[in-house]
């Protein structure tokens, strides 16, 4: 892209990611106001938040696959139009059911974050794109800290409709921004949605997130909850089988088996549990009235409690801006580990000192700095083993994992506090908060160890932005090569169709064709057959491109048109 276009694109991508995150989180400070305004129980009002997270988790992998295809711009615009329509439903004087429908439509926008990353990776220089992707990842989390106090303030002075009106204004602005700034996807992309996989994954995620949000079900009907959990696990297993057999999978499950990708998603799941656990603990503690027999708390209003999130957002943004500079010297997995330690420090601070409001601000600031660094480093680990064409799909799955982790963190925190609430008491004992903090420290310790295990792998497999050296030669890390030797060609038309699709897949994966059927002089036991040689910057990149959805489509076109010897080999340098 031209430099002037890039200048406009970067703030547009960050703004859109911030808007969809902030709008989806609007339900958090408005639950009590919704219950009062619509005359529904608090449990029903809680669904204004839950249904947004559910629709976002279900829509994210589907949008990620659509975003990997040629119609990414149309997908972004259509999704934002849905979000705007949902925002209008939350503002109009309609019954509670329509409010839930509007919140579900707003939650769909959560799937756009990964698409913003795909745009940045395709249309910006590598180093600039890496920094922007890290920033998008950060604002997708700190967006909650931006929207919470604003929504609470509007609700306090203008009612719940005024607060949701904020969502309508900013989503309309995001739609206009996307229409003016988001470019078309590069040519040669193709993407088909695996409908069967999408349906099964949606059912599994609905169960997982429902069980995470229904704490009373685990307390009162443990057998039912456990049975539904088993069903969810079975559905996830069925989904994995469907994806492995599909030629156009919703998520490239084979790529998820890459140690860097699998380890990063595990760290995201466990880390997400810990991060959201502390976020909910602090805000709930701040709003507990001190004079109501609890012996702790500050009795803050919703708006003032939202101000506690300001240090979280500000320091999270600072960490996100610093991370791209630090990652030139420190590998992303080490940054993940260091950030997890910082988040654990926030837990330790909350566990040891929370009698003063300033201490809560400090804990939230530490949490924000750790979360910001963790979020900024995460994309680098995953995208190191992911072709450009699969950016949206790979990051979409990571955000599904994050959503599950956040939901589990909220549920675990609620269960611990519920267990610490004595019979006849309205609020949990102060010691319950300490117990929850210790559980959070344990979660972040697991995240740290997982990240350190990733760091022990070769740097080239986990960080594409650092030039690494070979342990034996001192040179650059070994490249990867595709070597194809064609024994027979039975269907030239199928081969021609394959060549066209494969060339696009190779280009998207960063490959360079060095030999394509040129002259061959055979010696010894060699046979003068058509030979194709493709070079990649790393062996891992060569493997990932072979397993990508774009190349799998090429293999379908090739079918039985040839008999060939295909292998992936590692170079010496």
Image (cartoon, rainbow, N blue to C red):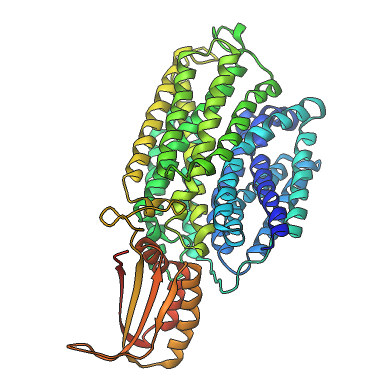
Q: Measuring 79% from the left and 39% from the top, which residue is drawn there?
A: 165
The quarter in which the C terminus is drawn is bottom left
The percent position of residue 112, horizontal first and vertical second, equals 62, 53
Which quarter shows the N terminus? bottom right
Q: Is residue 410 visible?
A: no
Please tell me how many numbered marks the rendered image carries: 0
The x and y percentages for residue 218 are 43, 32
Q: Nearer the viewer, residue 218 or 286?
A: 286
User: Image point 52% across, 40% down: which residue?
Assistant: 323
In this view of the protein, can residue 167 be seen by the observer? Answer: yes
Q: Residue at x 68, y 23 (%)?
A: 302
**Viewer-closest of 8 and 345:** 8
Rendering coords of residue 27 (x, y %): 66, 36
Name which residue lies at 43% across and 78% down.
556
In front: 294, or 529? Answer: 529
Left or right of 20, for residue 451:
left
Judged from this view, the residue extending furthest toward the left is 524
Quarter holding residue 445: top left
Residue 447, quarter of picture? top left
Above or below 512: residue 300? above
Query: In the rendered image of this protein, does residue 572 appear above or below residue 446?
Result: below
Compared with 126, 140 (above or below) is above
Where residue 475 appears, x then y in whole percent?
33, 58
């Amino acid at each position: 892209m031209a430099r002037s276009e890039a200048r406009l694109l970067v703030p547009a991508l960050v703004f859109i990611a911030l808007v969809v995150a902030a709008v989806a989180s609007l339900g958090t400070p408005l639950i009590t106001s919704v219950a009062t305004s619509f005359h529904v129980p608090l449990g029903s009002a809680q669904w204004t938040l839950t249904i947004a997270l559910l629709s976002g988790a279900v829509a994210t992998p589907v949008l990620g696959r659509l975003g990997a295809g040629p119609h990414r711009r149309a997908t972004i615009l259509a999704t934002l139009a849905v979000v705007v329509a949902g925002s209008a439903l939350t503002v109009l004087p309609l019954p509670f059911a329509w409010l839930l429908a509007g919140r579900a439509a707003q939650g769909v926008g959560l799937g756009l974050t990964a698409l913003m990353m795909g745009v940045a990776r395709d249309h910006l220089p590598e180093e600039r794109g890496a920094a922007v992707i890290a920033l998008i990842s950060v604002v997708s989390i700190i967006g909650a800290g931006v929207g919470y106090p604003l929504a609470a303030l509007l609700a306090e002075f203008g009612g719940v409709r005024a607060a949701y009106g904020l969502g309508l204004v900013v989503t309309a602005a995001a739609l206009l921004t996307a229409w003016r700034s988001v470019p078309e996807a590069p040519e040669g992309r193709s993407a088909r949605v695996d409908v069967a996989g999408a349906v099964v994954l949606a059912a599994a995620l609905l169960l997982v997130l429902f069980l995470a949000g229904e704490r009373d079900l685990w307390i009162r009907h443990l057998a039912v909850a456990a049975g539904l959990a088993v069903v969810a696990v079975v559905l996830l297993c069925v989904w994995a089988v469907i994806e492995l057999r599909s030629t156009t999978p919703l998520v490239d499950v084979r790529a998820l088996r890459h140690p860097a990708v699998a380890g990063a998603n595990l760290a995201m799941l466990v880390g997400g549990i810990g991060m959201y656990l502390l976020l909910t603990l602090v805000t709930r503690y701040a709003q507990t009235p001190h004079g109501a027999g609890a012996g702790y708390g500050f009795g803050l209003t919703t708006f003032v409690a939202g101000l506690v999130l300001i240090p979280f957002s500000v320091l999270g943004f600072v960490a996100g801006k610093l991370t791209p500079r630090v990652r030139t010297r420190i590998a992303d997995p080490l940054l993940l580990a260091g950030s997890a330690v910082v988040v654990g420090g926030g837990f330790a601070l909350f566990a040891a000192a929370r009698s003063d409001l300033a201490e809560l601000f400090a804990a939230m600031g530490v949490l924000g700095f750790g979360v910001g660094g963790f979020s900024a480093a995460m994309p680098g680990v995953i995208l190191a083993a992911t072709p450009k064409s699969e950016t949206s799909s790979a990051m979409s799955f990571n955000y599904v994992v994050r959503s599950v982790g956040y939901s589990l963190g909220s549920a675990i925190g609620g269960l611990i506090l519920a267990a610490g609430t004595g019979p006849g008491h309205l609020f949990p004992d102060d010691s319950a908060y300490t117990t929850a903090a210790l559980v959070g420290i344990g979660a972040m310790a697991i995240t740290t160890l997982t990240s350190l295990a990733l760091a022990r792998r070769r740097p080239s497999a986990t960080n594409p932005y650092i030039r690494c050296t070979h342990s034996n030669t001192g040179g650059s890390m070994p490249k990867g090569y595709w070597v194809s030797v064609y024994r027979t060609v039975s269907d030239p038309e199928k081969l021609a169709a394959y060549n066209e699709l494969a060339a696009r897949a190779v280009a998207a994966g960063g490959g360079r064709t060095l030999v394509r059927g040129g002259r061959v002089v055979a010696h010894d036991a060699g046979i003068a057959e058509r030979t194709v040689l493709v070079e990649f910057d790393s062996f891992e990149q060569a493997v990932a491109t072979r397993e990508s959805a774009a190349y799998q489509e090429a293999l379908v076109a090739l079918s039985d048109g040839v008999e060939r010897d295909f292998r992936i080999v590692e170079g010496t340098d």
